[in-house]
Image (cartoon, rainbow, N blue to C red):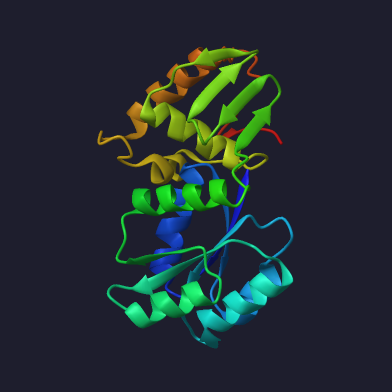
């Protein structure tokens, strides 16, 4: 799974973008300051989304330090029309920039382009005989492709990205809300979980993938 460090001090952006990127198959670690960014970066980090303005410094200094110590790809998040920030960021070695406000799907496309260009685009998640290629949005089991709707696919990614954790029905609804342009309520969620289990060949009586935790929700084991 692609590990993303999101360095952004706006709580709303952090919450919404983390939710969206998690649904797209990314694992997101938030950092809201220069200090947190330097503490949370690791050799396993595949990509950094970096805001220019931080409460304890600026993103330019962070970019220089991250590039020097880790060489991790960096995409700057800049204010719309801030040409100086764009030029400065690129001169410091940033791999791309995205102007705020941005469309999440455009950001994901730019992220995947940078990951491919820098050789960090491995995006295959495996769980037993289930294999999910998030780059191709392809799901296979025992080598046989499984065709999922957009909402079924997003639901599967949410489970895989939260392996080992119990997800309540309300949490699942938050994660997949209106992703396919359809209204999703509690009854609809039940239908989609059943459809997903059916397509994965996951026996409800003895599920090997999506397990029901009675009274709490669902989980996928690590």
The residue sitting at 59% across, 43% down in the picture is 121
Foreground residue among 11 and 143: 143
Q: Nearer the viewer, residue 124 or 153?
A: 124
Q: Is residue 211 visible?
A: no
Which image quadrant is residue 144 in? top right
Is residue 12 shown above or below 124? below
On screen, residue 38 versus residue 51, left or right, reads: right
Q: Position of residue 187 (x, y in %)?
A: 34, 28
Residue extending farthest to the bottom is 56
Nearest the eye: 120 or 90 = 90
Residue drawn at (68%, 68%), measured in percent from left and top?
40
User: Dividing the image into 4 quarters, which one contains the C terminus?
Assistant: top right
x, y percent for residue 125:
63, 34
Residue 19: percent from the left, percent from the top?
A: 45, 52
Residue at (60%, 52%) from the top-left corner? Answer: 118
For residue 40, above or below residue 156: below
Please report the residue visible at 40 percent of the width from the left and 79 percent of the height from the top: 85
Vertical order, 109 against 147 (above or below) = below
- Figure check: 25 above or below 28: above
Q: How many marks?
A: 0
Locate residue 171, reporting x and y percent. Answer: 46, 45
Which quadrant does the N terminus fall into?
top right
Judging depth in this view, the residue of 11 and 190 nearest the camera is 11
């Amino acid at each position: 799974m692609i590990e993303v460090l999101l360095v952004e001090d706006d709580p709303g952006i952090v919450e919404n973008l983390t939710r969206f990127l998690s649904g797209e198959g990314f694992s997101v670690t938030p950092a809201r300051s220069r200090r947190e960014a330097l503490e949370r970066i690791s050799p396993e980090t595949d990509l950094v989304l970096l805001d220019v303005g931080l409460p304890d410094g600026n993103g330019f200094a962070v970019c220089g330090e991250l590039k020097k110590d880790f060489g991790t790809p960096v995409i700057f998040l800049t204010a719309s029309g801030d040409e100086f920030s764009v030029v400065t960021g690129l001169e410091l070695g940033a791999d791309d920039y995205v102007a705020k406000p941005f469309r999440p799907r455009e950001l994901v496309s730019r992220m995947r382009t940078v990951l491919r260009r820098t050789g960090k685009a491995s995006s295959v998640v495996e769980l037993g005989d289930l294999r999910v290629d998030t780059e191709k949005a392809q799901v296979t089991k025992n080598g046989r492709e499984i065709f999922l709707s957009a909402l079924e696919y997003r639901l599967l990614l949410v489970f895989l990205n939260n392996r080992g954790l119990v997800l309540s029905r309300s949490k699942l609804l938050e994660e997949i809300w209106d992703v396919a342009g359809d209204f999703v309520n509690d009854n609809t969620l039940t239908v989609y979980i059943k459809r997903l289990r059916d397509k994965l060949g996951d026996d409800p009586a003895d599920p090997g993938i999506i397990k029901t935790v009675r009274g709490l929700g669902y989980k996928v084991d690590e």
